[in-house]
Image (cartoon, rainbow, N blue to C red):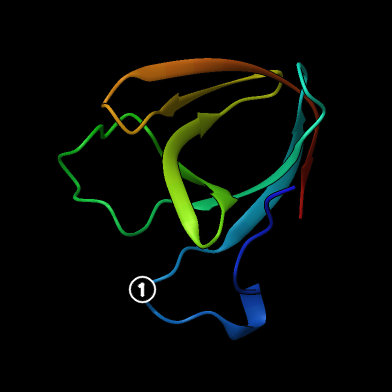
Amino acid sequence: MAFAFYTNDRRTADQGRVLGCFTEVDFGQHFEFAERFGFPEDFHPEMPHVVFVGRGETRLAHVKKTVLKMVHDDDVVEQWMIKGRREY
């Protein structure tokens, strides 16, 4: 499980609003996602979200209804199947 390290009512100006959560299909892990923040505008501009992956770490992503695309550490784009997407 990877939750946001802040809440919407206690975020700073440089943090994106937490938008919702989802469960990834293969291992059943739960993640939260937020508006994009903390990455340069010209680095993968097609990724409008960040996913909280644990220990205060985030990754760029595009979270759709049943799939997400995420930029991995090596600048490789992964695709995950997701379920239970919920918006806050």
Q: Which residue is mark 1?
A: 14
- Measured as percent of width and height from the top left, residue 43 is found at 19, 38
Q: Amino acid at mark 1?
A: Asp
Rendered position, 20 above or below 63: below
- Choose between 41 and 28: the one closer to the eye: 28
- Measured as percent of width and height from the top left, residue 12 is found at 45, 82
> Could you tell whether 28 is left or right of 44 in the image?
right
Report how many numbered discs are placed on residues in the image.
1
Query: What residue is rendered at 53% in x and 79% in y?
Result: 11
Secondary element type, mark 1: loop
> Could you tell whether 32 is left or right of 71 in the image?
right
- Measured as percent of width and height from the top left, residue 34 is found at 55, 53
- Choose between 16 and 82: the one closer to the eye: 82
Rendered position, 34 above or below 75: below
Residue 66 figure quarter: top right
- Choose between 54 and 17: the one closer to the eye: 54
Rendered position, 40 above or below 82: below
Residue 77 figure quarter: top left
Query: What residue is rendered at 69% in x and 23% in y?
Result: 65
